[in-house]
Amino acid sequence: MNNQVVKNTVLFITLVLIQVLILNNINLFGYLNPYVYIVFVIFYPLRKDKGSFLFLSFLLGLAIDFFSNSGGINAAATLLIAYIRLPLLSKILNKTDFEYQSFSIRSLSFGKSFSFILLLTFIHHFILFGLEYFSLDSFGTILSKSLLNTLFTTITIFIVIVLFTKKK
């Protein structure tokens, strides 16, 4: 079996278990909850088949929904960020900086990787909380929860990146 397939499978299963067993039980100040499972979307190789990547992202969100009893909102948010990941990355990076074969989130400058992760996380959270509340009357709550959880999740993701990836 391919080494990259094994890494992606282990990452997928590990992120689901960590999110469901540990992180879903964290509720700081009543509403801060890190959604670190989106690291899978960030780290998935760019040159792989886009259809299988979208399917795996949907399965990841669906697994989180299944264990969290959240009715498909994680699947929708994760599928959307998987779909817009490459166009967003091409907008943030210059054409000369963008190499599919040697791309690594740790090889980017801090500003570019921070912008990419922050935007992707905010979009995920805005869709997630928008579908959770599903009311224009709750727009302020959706926006505030999205912003605060984005900051908390982004900090947590950077801690994960520093601790568990190699600098290239």
Image: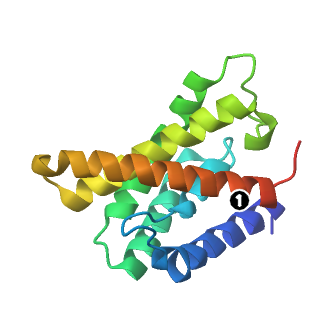
Judge by depth and name the residue closer to the eye, 27 or 161: 27
Would you say 149 lies left or right of 94 here?
Answer: left
Q: Position of residue 14 (x, y in %)?
A: 65, 74
Q: Is residue 4 left or right of residue 114?
A: right
Which residue is at the far front? 29
Taking 118 as reference, is 57 above or below it?
A: below
Q: Of residues 68 and 156, which is closer to you in this image?
A: 156
3, above or below 19, in the image: above
User: Residue visible at 75% across and 22% down?
Assistant: 97
Judged from the image, the secondary structure of the residue bearing numbered disc 1 is helix
Amino acid type, mark 1: Val
Quarter that holds the C terminus: top right
The residue under label 1 is: 160
Q: Is residue 165 left or right of residue 129?
A: right
Describe residue 71's horizontal placement relative to residue 68 as left or right: left
Residue 36 position, x and y percent, is 56, 62
User: Which quarter shows the N terminus?
Assistant: bottom right
The answer to whether residue 80 is visible is no
Query: What is the x, y in percent for residue 79?
Result: 43, 53
Residue 27 x, y percent position in the rendering: 44, 72
Q: Quadrant of residue 160?
A: bottom right
Residue 155 visible in the snapshot? yes
